[in-house]
Amino acid sequence: MASVTASKNSQGSTARSAAGGHRHQRLDPLVDAEIDDVPAAEPTVVGGRRTLAYLGVCLVLIGLNLRTVFSSFAAVLPEVTADVGLPGWAVAALNTAPVTLLGMFAPLAPRLARQFGAERVLLGATAVLTAGLLLRPLDVPGVGHLPALLAGTAACGAAISLCNVLLPGLVKRDFPHRLGLMGGLYTTAICASAALGAGFTYPLFSASGQWTAALWFWALPAGVVLLLFLPLAAAQRHGRHQTAASGINVWRSAVAWQVTGFMVFQSMMSFSVFAWLAPILRERGVDGGTAGLIVSASIVLQMLGSLFAPALAARLRDQRAINTVVALMTGGGFALSIFGPLDLVWLWTGLLGLGQGSLTAVALTMIMLRTRDGHTAAHLSGMMQGVGYGVGSAGTLLVGQLHQATGSFAAAGVLFLVVGSLAAVFGFRAGKARFVGG
């Protein structure tokens, strides 16, 4: 057992030291949030290959719970609004708050991991996510559903933020020789979680007759993975770590700001799809079950785009063309989902899904293509997540405000033609072949 652990620790250290030197030979989209730790954070201690495989399953299952909070609420939004009498500001807050918190809590993740260990922070985040999902549909005597909806949704957003930051580093640290497989499973699980939330929440509502039961269901898989991961995370020991001296200041780099701007407008469209595509379709006359299937199919196409776009982007001399095309595809697909003939709605949402998946993937790929080493990549990733999600949450807020002010989603269609165009502009600038720091 000791020899297995020692060998694995050696492999993890080797992978860390080689990350910068081999980045150009193999594009690695997994950013290690603990890369500045001194001494380097050790891989998760396991007793053999079976336990290592068990750890891999747990990490993928955590990923499978990171987007259901967004798509499940959107699937039954009309029912929740009618039953609870949600005011317009509350609908906007419930769709905006979790995305804003993704940006606000992202900088805390490395600090918490440095103090408590990444595994335990990830365990705590999973516990908070489960608690938030349980709290969200609760009817509090005397005050109703709204306080629990707000508090539960906020808790989920904060927990998902920590998982977003720490999971890629754990996958990279603990599976240095299976990065392709584990990275693919992890990213696919996140996309699949959004598709599952969109596709199954309304059928759960139809079967139970209660939107609360449909939302409560998503606490079950989160609770299961919490119990599965508990013994492994609790057994980890954590030593003292300090932060290494920083190198390039990404906040002073024009290239970093162009990449971050690209991420901002990508996020505006991405989370607006999760929050508003199902309500948009239902307002156009599509029944709840069919709307859920359409959104799920669109998200499956997102998965397809995210598989192929990074490899294509990495092979090009620069990424100006692909960044521009996928940004315009996404903005155009969103607008056509609102304005286009309803008979072709599968086509419009398919275009949106393929564009959005590719757009998200190439935006994240810019982290690796515009940096020369893992430390700079980690700092650029933190900047992109903090600003990108924080400012990008304005997209979901604006859609809600425009709908409340005008009584339709037509203004939102115009908004995303503009947002898609701005994403194309920033994507074109970010796509030029150069590096953060010159």
Image (cartoon, helix red, strand yellow):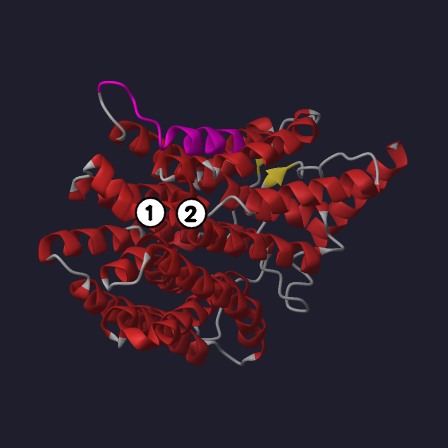
The picture places residue 125, in percent across and down from the top left corner, at: 51, 33
- Amino acid marked by disc 2: Thr
Q: Was residue 132 drawn as part of the magenta stretch in this picture?
A: yes
Evaluate whether residue 121 shows in this view.
yes
Q: Residue at x 53, y 81 (%)?
A: 317
Is 98 in front, or is 253?
A: 98
Image position of 156 (left or right of 407): right
Quarter occupied by the N terminus: top right
3D distance between C-alphas at marks 2 and 1: 7 Å
Is disc 2 placed on a helix, strand or loop? helix
Residue 343: quadrant of the picture: bottom left
The picture places residue 266, in percent across and down from the top left corner, at: 37, 62
| Category of crowding for the residue at label 1, using alpha-carbon neighbours closer than 10 angstroms: few (below 14), some (14–19), many (at least 20) | many
For disc 1, the marked residue is 76
- Amino acid marked by disc 1: Val
Marks counted in the figure total 2
Residue range highlighted in magenta: 126-142
Evaluate whether residue 380 shows in this view.
no
Image position of 156 (left or right of 181): left
The picture places residue 89, in percent across and down from the top left corner, at: 18, 42
Q: Residue at x 53, y 29 (%)?
A: 124
For disc 2, the marked residue is 201
Is 291 in front, or is 411?
A: 291
Location of residue 194 with respect to 81 vertically, above or below: below
Image position of 50 (left or right of 279): right
Image mark for residue 32: none
The picture places residue 337, in percent across and down from the top left corner, at: 30, 69
Return the residue found at the far top: 142
Is disc 1 placed on a helix, strand or loop? loop
The answer to which of marks 2 and 1 sits earlier in the sequence is 1
Residue 178: quadrant of the picture: bottom right
Residue 230: quadrant of the picture: top right
